[in-house]
Amino acid sequence: MEQRDIQVVWDKRAVKSLMKLHKYIAEKNPENATRFINRMKDFGNSLGAFPEKFPHNRFEKYTKLGYHTAVFESNYIFFYKGKGEKLHICSIFNTSCLK
């Protein structure tokens, strides 16, 4: 697997997901919320180094659109896809929301 280091772009939907998650966690523990979101951001930004490391999405309609999925700490799934020399993180879902 070749390391590429392409630019990672966070789409609005993904940023909104991070903000909502931070708000939810911060209600009980603001410090923990910030640390967790920072880990998520670091993980997302690291996807640019090996964009093909994670498989295409298991749902056929998303595979056809070129989406990959990466699991973060067993509970969150990053949907992303490459567009030229950029990797777009399109959205983030809690695994409990997917069926």
Image (spheres, helix red, strand yellow):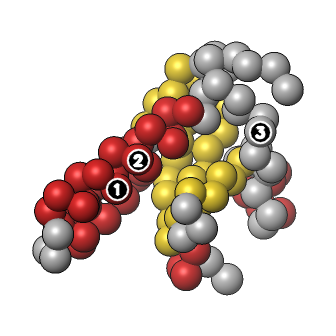
Q: Using the numbered discs, state the Cα–Cα distance from disc 2 to disc 1 in whole angstroms.
A: 5 Å
Task: Tell me the distance, in whole angstroms, between the alpha carbons under discs 1 and 3.
Answer: 23 Å
How far apart in space, not on screen, are marks 2 and 3 (Cα)?
Answer: 19 Å
Q: Quadrant of the C terminus?
A: bottom right
Question: Image height check: is 54 above or below 82?
Answer: below
Amino acid at dot 2: Arg
Q: Which kind of residue does numbered mark 1 sit on?
A: Phe
The residue that mark 2 highlights is 39
Q: Secondary structure at mark 2?
A: helix
Q: How far across and how far down the image is residue 67, in percent?
A: 71, 48
Which quadrant of the view contains residue 75?
Answer: bottom right
The amino acid type, in three-letter code, at marker 3 is Lys
Pointer 1 local density, CA inside 10 Å: few below 14, some 14–19, many at least 20: some
* Residue 89 locus on image (x, y percent): 53, 42
Q: Mark 1 highlights which residue? A: 36
Quarter of the figure with residue 32: bottom left
Q: Going 85% across and 26% down the picture, which residue do you hit?
A: 1
Q: Up-down: is 12 above or below 27?
A: above
Location of mark 3 (residue):
53
Where residue 69 sits: x, y (%)?
Answer: 68, 53
Q: Secondary structure at mark 1?
A: helix
Of mark 2 and mark 3, the one earlier in the sequence is 2
Query: Mark 1 against mark 3, which lies toward the viewer?
Result: 1
Residue at x-position 51% and y-position 28%: 8
Q: Position of residue 43 (x, y in %)?
A: 51, 42
Question: Residue at 44% of width from left, 38% of height from top?
Answer: 42
